Image (cartoon, rainbow, N blue to C red):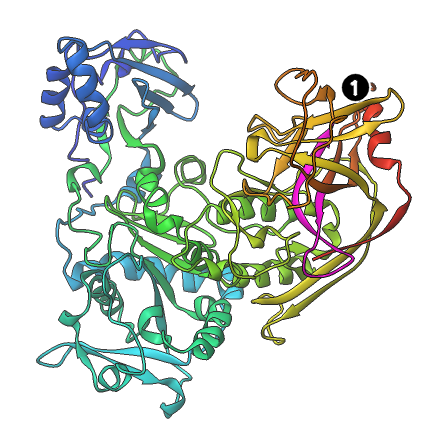
């Protein structure tokens, strides 16, 4: 069988594969001396130069104008594993990594004879995709155990064989039998285009059937994929959930966990920038197959090796174009993040190529066959979610940075993932946290340089990160001494049957010290102060001025902490010492005319065995609630890093503190 790739390397990019011997890690080779030479090599089909041009065009044009057309690019060898027959190459400073492998029998079989077409026919799609799906269903026990039989309330029935292909909305309750029903789901961007939707005014038309050509091009592409795999039913949220019915939306949104786990396949339209476009329309098929190079190291050609390496090597880009999928706007949507986590099998229609991921293995058009494990681990990211507190914290950081068309969906768009984690961890889910992690997990931080604010409509208690619009970082888990106790936590749900869904009300009661402070300024300029009776001075703690959440200081949840109207002039309010990041700020005769009365609640103290003089303490910043007497709301957190400061927070008696 012929497995020779069509794309090759130019003379400059072949340098690491020539010479006396395998180059050492750190070796550098002169590349094209002019940008014009680089462009010509790319036009000539050089794999490495083509990707550099494609991904660094704007920067290249800028440098070309600044350097009179001269280039100082270097091709660097950044890793070598001679025994395994592996080199890693990097061109320039764009951090574009390329992997070179000996083309042994296993890699040759993984590449096969697949020749990616510019436009796919139904037959070509079937020949590529069906073996992937069949292999997973026959061989992967973990995929089978993750999948859950489920029949959605509504589905789109595909009828492609009529004179005019169309789709028809059906209620599955009306079907005579669903025992063998198979459906796929679709992940897409809503965008700003006017999409066809299921509403009270369109339901009759959708039930009678609409022409496939009346749907957005991205929907048509997903339907073509389903048809090529002989799947007759498709679930698309905009057409299977009543968009003008809050009751139907709430019920179906709560069923996402089952809908995506029950699907045969999830089709992610990751190459389409909008729903009006297709994913596979503008790809360069010459860069899908790996490049080939024939090594000519002197000691290989002379036969000095006992087991000479094979002369034919292949070169592929890092991640096989996965960054094209990962960095696509689709993957920055909160709902899509949940869909990807829940689906058993995912087909990504990237702008560069098709990727298939299940819970056991991955395929793509570059390697449509089984990759050796050591190659797959290096080239292909693992999408399978892992259950554990650390992984949940990482997920919160990623999810909170994702976008939502409707910000009030923040709770529901992670509900399915939360349910999966709860089952894996055997834990109780509480408004974005796990019961066993309280109260330490309350010390999340907002992105100090991002745009964060409290949600305008209630969706979670203030102590939950779900109440914030913007990116958050979950607390750090390290050895610590707890400084307060969690007495109780209570959540009122909009739907009592869905503990992971929308929240109507919530509160937590902690037992600990509650120290009064005065807060003034906003955001990164905020400061709070209290009187240190030991030294007879007012001591201030400055807001954190660094992205490093380990620095001492304040972390405000949002910039617009409201100043109370009763903030009064205090002529004796002079700040003599500031403890915080950014150096010591000394303010002589400073009069603070407006301030907010806040309270600090110590939560835990970090154990530092290597620095006996330091003892990082962390706590919540609270404000008295205007709506509920005797209760508090969270407005931020604080951190100190010396034992000498602890008495400022522990001077008061321990008491119950209700936070809403």
Identify the residue shown where x is 36% and y is 69%: 237
Q: Main secondary structure of the magenta part?
A: strand
Label 1 packing within 10 angstroms: few (<14), some (14-19), many (20+) = few
Q: Position of residue 642 (x, y in %)?
A: 79, 23
Please state which of residues 11 and 312 is positioned toward the viewer in this rendering: 11
Quadrant for residue 76, please give it: top left
Q: Which residue is mark 1?
A: 611
Quadrant of the frame with the C terminus: bottom right
Q: Which residues are magenta?
A: 621-640
629 versus 373 height, above or below: below
Quadrant for residue 97, please give it: top left
Count of numbered circles on the image? 1
Please state which of residues 240 and 464 is positioned toward the viewer in this rendering: 464
143 versus 331 height, above or below: below
From the viewer's perspective, tell me whether residue 190 is left or right of residue 595: left
Identify the residue shown where x is 28% and y is 76%: 232
Q: Is 632 contained in the magenta span?
A: yes
Identify the residue shown where x is 47% and y is 52%: 360
């Amino acid at each position: 069988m012929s497995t020779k790739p069509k794309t090759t390397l130019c003379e400059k990019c072949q340098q690491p594969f020539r010479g006396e011997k395998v180059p050492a890690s750190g070796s550098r080779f002169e590349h094209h001396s002019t940008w014009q030479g680089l462009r010509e090599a790319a036009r000539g089909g050089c794999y490495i130069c083509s990707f550099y041009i494609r991904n660094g065009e704007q920067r290249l044009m800028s440098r070309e104008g600044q350097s009179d057309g001269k280039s100082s690019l270097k091709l660097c060898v950044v890793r070598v594993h001679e025994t395994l027959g592996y080199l890693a190459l990097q061109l320039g400073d764009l951090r574009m990594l390329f992997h070179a492998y000996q083309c042994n029998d296993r890699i040759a079989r993984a590449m096969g004879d697949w020749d990616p077409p510019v436009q796919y026919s139904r037959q070509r799609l079937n020949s590529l995709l069906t073996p992937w799906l069949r292999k997973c269903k026959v061989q992967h026990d973990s995929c089978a155990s993750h999948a859950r039989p489920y029949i959605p309330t509504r589905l789109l029935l595909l009828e492609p064989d009529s004179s005019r292909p169309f789709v028809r909305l059906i209620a599955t309750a009306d079907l005579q039998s669903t025992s063998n029903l198979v459906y796929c789901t679709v992940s897409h961007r809503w965008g700003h285009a006017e999409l066809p939707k299921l509403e009270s005014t369109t339901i009759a038309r959708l039930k009678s059937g609409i022409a496939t050509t009346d749907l957005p091009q991205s929907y048509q592409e997903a339907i073509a994929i389903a048809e090529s795999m002989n799947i007759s039913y498709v679930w698309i949220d905009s057409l299977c959930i009543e968009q003008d019915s809050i009751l139907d939306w709430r019920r179906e949104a709560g069923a996402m966990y089952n809908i995506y786990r029950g699907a045969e396949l999830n089709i992610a339209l990751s190459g389409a920038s909008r729903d009006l476009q297709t994913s596979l329309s503008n790809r360069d098929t010459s860069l899908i197959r790996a490049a080939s190079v024939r090594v000519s190291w002197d000691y290989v050609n002379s036969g000095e090796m006992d087991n000479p390496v094979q002369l034919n090597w292949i070169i592929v880009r890092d991640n096989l174009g996965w960054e094209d999928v990962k960095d696509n706007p689709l993957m920055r949507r909160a709902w899509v993040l949940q869909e990807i986590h829940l689906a058993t099998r995912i087909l990504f229609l990237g702008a560069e190529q098709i990727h298939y991921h299940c819970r056991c293995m991955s395929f793509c058009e570059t390697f449509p066959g089984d990759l050796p494990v050591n190659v797959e681990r290096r080239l292909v990211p693992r999408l399978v979610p892992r259950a554990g507190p650390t992984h949940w914290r990482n997920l919160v950081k990623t999810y909170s940075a994702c976008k939502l068309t409707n910000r009030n969906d923040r709770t529901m768009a992670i509900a399915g993932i939360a349910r999966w984690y709860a089952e894996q961890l055997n834990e109780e889910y509480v408004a974005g946290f796990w019961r066993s992690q309280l109260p330490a997990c309350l010390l999340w931080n907002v992105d100090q340089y991002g745009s964060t604010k409290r949600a305008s409509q209630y969706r979670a208690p203030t102590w939950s990160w779900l109440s914030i619009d913007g990116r958050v970082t979950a607390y750090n888990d390290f050895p610590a001494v707890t400084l307060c106790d969690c007495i109780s936590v209570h959540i009122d749900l909009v739907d009592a049957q869905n503990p992971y869904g929308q929240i109507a009300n919530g509160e937590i009661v902690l037992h600990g010290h509650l120290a009064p402070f005065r807060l003034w300024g906003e955001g990164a300029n905020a400061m709070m102060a209290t009187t240190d009776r030991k030294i007879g001075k007012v001591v201030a703690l400055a807001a954190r001025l660094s992205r490093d959440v380990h620095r001492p200081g304040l972390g405000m949840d949002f910039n617009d902490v409201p100043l109370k109207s009763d903030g009064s002039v205090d002529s004796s309010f002079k700040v003599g010492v500031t403890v915080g990041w950014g150096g010591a700020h000394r303010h002589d005769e400073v009069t603070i005319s407006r301030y907010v009365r806040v309270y600090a609640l110590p939560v835990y103290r970090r154990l530092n065995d290597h620095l006996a003089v330091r003892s990082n303490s962390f706590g919540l910043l609270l404000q008295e609630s205007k709506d509920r007497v005797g209760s508090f709301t969270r407005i931020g957190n604080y951190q100190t890093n010396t034992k000498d400061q602890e008495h400022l927070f522990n001077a008061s008696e321990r008491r119950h503190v209700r936070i809403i």
